[in-house]
Image (spheres, rainbow, N blue to C red):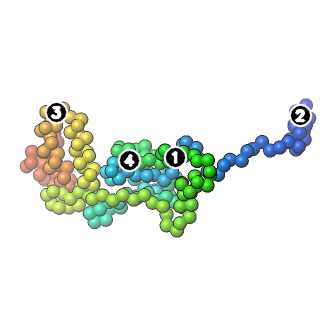
């Protein structure tokens, strides 16, 4: 019985119009993700996005006293893991505030879908200064901006009395490299266990 029904449906469908409808070229769903855009004001160059990137699109390049955080548009798979892990919420992967215009060609111009046709890969680069050790002058593998944010965040989460005591200690301790911290912490009286 099912073969007869299937055959009749097949013959009936031969004479019907197609069910699919054409979609406009410029249509973008609300959940569409684009190349990660970094807010340079918020970003501290901590490298969390680099550690979390599964495609290898995000790179940290330390050269001299500068760190460049770079996202390669050809390698990015738009997974959004970098934006999820960013402690400063400095990354976004969506077209914010974009309204779909009536003319599809206008949308294509505004989004610039052909930007990937260039020979050079589309990138999003941000450069920061690396911290120098306040004792020996060695360049540390951390940015100045990141250390300032960590210091302030730590002090904000402490009791006011404790924060007052640790404020000066943190200034010395965070701006020294690991080997200088080990050598100088008892001399400075900045040993981390003193406030426990």
Q: CA distance from mark 4 to mark 3?
A: 29 Å
Asked if the residue at tag 3 contacts the one at tag 2, i.e. Cβ–Cβ closer than 8 Å, the answer is no
Residue 79 versus residue 66 in the image, above or below = above
Q: Nearer the viewer, mark 4 or mark 3?
A: 4
Give the mark nearest the N terminus, 3 or 1.
1
Q: Quadrant of the N terminus?
A: top right
Name the foreground residue: 172 vs 40.
40
User: Which residue reaches farthest front?
Assistant: 102
Asked if the residue at tag 4 contacts the one at tag 1, i.e. Cβ–Cβ closer than 8 Å, the answer is no
Q: Residue at x 24, y 35 (%)?
A: 157
Task: Look at mark 2 in the image and give the residue it sits on.
Answer: 5
Whether residue 189 sits left or right of residue 114 in the image: it is left
Q: Could you say whether the residue bearing mark 4 is in a helix, strand or loop?
A: loop
Q: Within the image, what quadrant is residue 6 found in?
A: top right
Q: Quadrant of the C terminus?
A: top left
For residue 160, which numbered disc appears in the image? 3
Task: Look at mark 1 in the image and give the residue it sits on.
Answer: 98
How packed is label 1: few (under 14 Cα within 10 Å), some, or many (20 or more)? few
Name the foreground residue: 46 vs 37.
37
Q: CA distance from mark 1 to mark 2?
A: 49 Å
Q: Could you say whether the residue bearing mark 1 is in a helix, strand or loop?
A: loop
Give the mark nearest the N terminus, 2 or 4.
2
For residue 120, which numbered disc appears in the image? none
Give the mark nearest the N terminus, 1 or 2.
2
Give the mark nearest the N terminus, 2 or 3.
2
């Amino acid at each position: 019985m099912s073969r007869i029904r299937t055959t009749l449906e097949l013959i009936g469908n031969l004479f019907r119009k197609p069910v699919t409808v054409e979609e406009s070229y410029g249509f973008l769903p609300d959940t569409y993700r684009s190349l990660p855009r970094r807010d340079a004001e918020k970003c501290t160059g901590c490298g969390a996005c680099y550690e979390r990137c599964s495609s290898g699109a995000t790179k940290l390049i330390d050269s001299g006293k500068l760190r460049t955080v770079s996202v390669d548009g050809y390698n990015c798979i738009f997974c959004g893991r970098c934006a999820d892990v960013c402690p400063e919420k400095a990354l976004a992967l969506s077209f914010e505030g974009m309204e779909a215009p009536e003319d599809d060609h206008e949308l294509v111009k505004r989004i610039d879908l052909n930007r990937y046709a260039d020979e050079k890969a589309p990138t999003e680069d941000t450069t920061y200064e690396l911290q120098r050790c306040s004792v020996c002058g060695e360049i540390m593998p951390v940015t100045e901006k990141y250390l300032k944010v960590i210091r302030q965040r730590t002090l904000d989460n402490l009791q006011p009395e404790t924060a007052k005591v640790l404020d000066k200690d943190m200034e010395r301790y965070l701006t020294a490299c690991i080997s200088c911290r080990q050598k100088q912490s008892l001399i400075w009286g900045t040993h981390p266990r003193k406030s426990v």
